[in-house]
Image: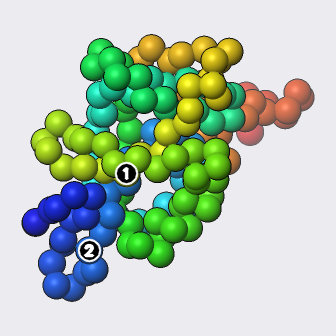
């Protein structure tokens, strides 16, 4: 499996895919994971030098320059058309900017980051892990009053 820059070659049967790192609502089981349905899941990873902030329905990472700040997420392989669609979904370059960022193993991934002024009054997530809102199929809503099953029939 050869790789150069943000692309990874999975062989002649597949086109070169762009590696994209996601850390919020696009992760598996989260509210917008359907945006990546059918994309190739590569694995989980951690990026250094990015601080994570909780904006409520979604998070925003900001380049911090501090190697102690880390961002946890997932890597997917996307073809150029899917990457362009993801740019539109993420509001790039207006809301987020898509930057090339190094992984510990030397590969590079695309990651969507915001600007410091967008998070100046927002709580930083020190763990670097956004646990946000799960996808509707993953949510466990309590039973309505009077409808709880007591296990007896």
Q: Position of residue 69 (x, y in %)?
A: 35, 19
Q: What's the residue at 14%, 44% (across, down)?
A: 106
Q: What's the residue at 55%, 36% (across, down)?
A: 114
Q: Position of residue 137 (x, y in %)?
A: 63, 50
Q: Is residue 37 visible?
A: no
Q: What's the residue at 41%, 73% (across, down)?
A: 80
Q: Position of residue 135 (x, y in %)?
A: 62, 46
Q: Position of residue 104 (x, y in %)?
A: 17, 36
In the image as oriented, which residue stretches furthest toward the right? Answer: 146
Asked if residue 144 is positioned above or below residue 119 in the image, the reply reads below
Q: Residues within 10 Å of mark 1 (few under 14, many from 20)?
A: many
Name which of mark 2 and mark 1 comes first in the sequence: 2
Q: Residues within 10 Å of mark 2 (few under 14, many from 20)?
A: some
- Indicate the secondary structure of the residue bearing disc 2: loop
Q: Say left or right for 21 vs 27.
A: left
Q: Say left or right for 58 vs 47.
A: right
Q: What's the residue at 60%, 14% (across, down)?
A: 123
Residue 6 is marked as none
**Mark 2 to mark 1: distance in Å?**
14 Å
In the image as oriented, which residue stretches furthest toward the bottom? Answer: 13
Quadrant of residue 73 within the rendered picture: top left
Q: Is residue 14 visible?
A: yes
Quadrant containing the C terminus in the rendered view: top right
Asked if residue 68 is positioned above or below residue 62 in the image, the reply reads above
Q: Say left or right for 70 vs 24.
A: left
- Which residue is under mark 1? 110
Comparing 87 with 14, the one in front is: 87
Quadrant containing the N terminus in the rendered view: bottom left
- Which residue is under mark 2? 16
Quadrant of residue 47 within the rendered picture: top left
């Amino acid at each position: 499996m050869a790789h150069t820059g943000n692309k990874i070659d999975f062989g002649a049967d597949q086109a070169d895919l762009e590696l994209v790192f996601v850390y919020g609502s696009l992760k598996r089981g989260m509210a917008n994971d359907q945006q990546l349905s059918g994309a190739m899941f590569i694995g989980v990873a951690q990026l250094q030098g990015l601080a994570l902030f909780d904006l409520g329905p979604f998070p925003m990472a900001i380049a911090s320059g501090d190697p102690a700040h880390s961002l946890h997420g997932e890597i997917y392989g996307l073809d150029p058309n899917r990457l362009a669609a993801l740019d539109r979904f993420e509001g790039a370059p207006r809301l987020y900017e898509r930057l090339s960022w190094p992984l510990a193993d030397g590969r590079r991934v695309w990651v969507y980051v915001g600007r410091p002024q967008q998070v100046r009054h927002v709580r930083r997530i020190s763990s670097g892990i956004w646990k946000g809102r799960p996808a509707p199929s993953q949510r466990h809503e309590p039973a309505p009053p009077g409808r709880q099953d007591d296990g007896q029939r």
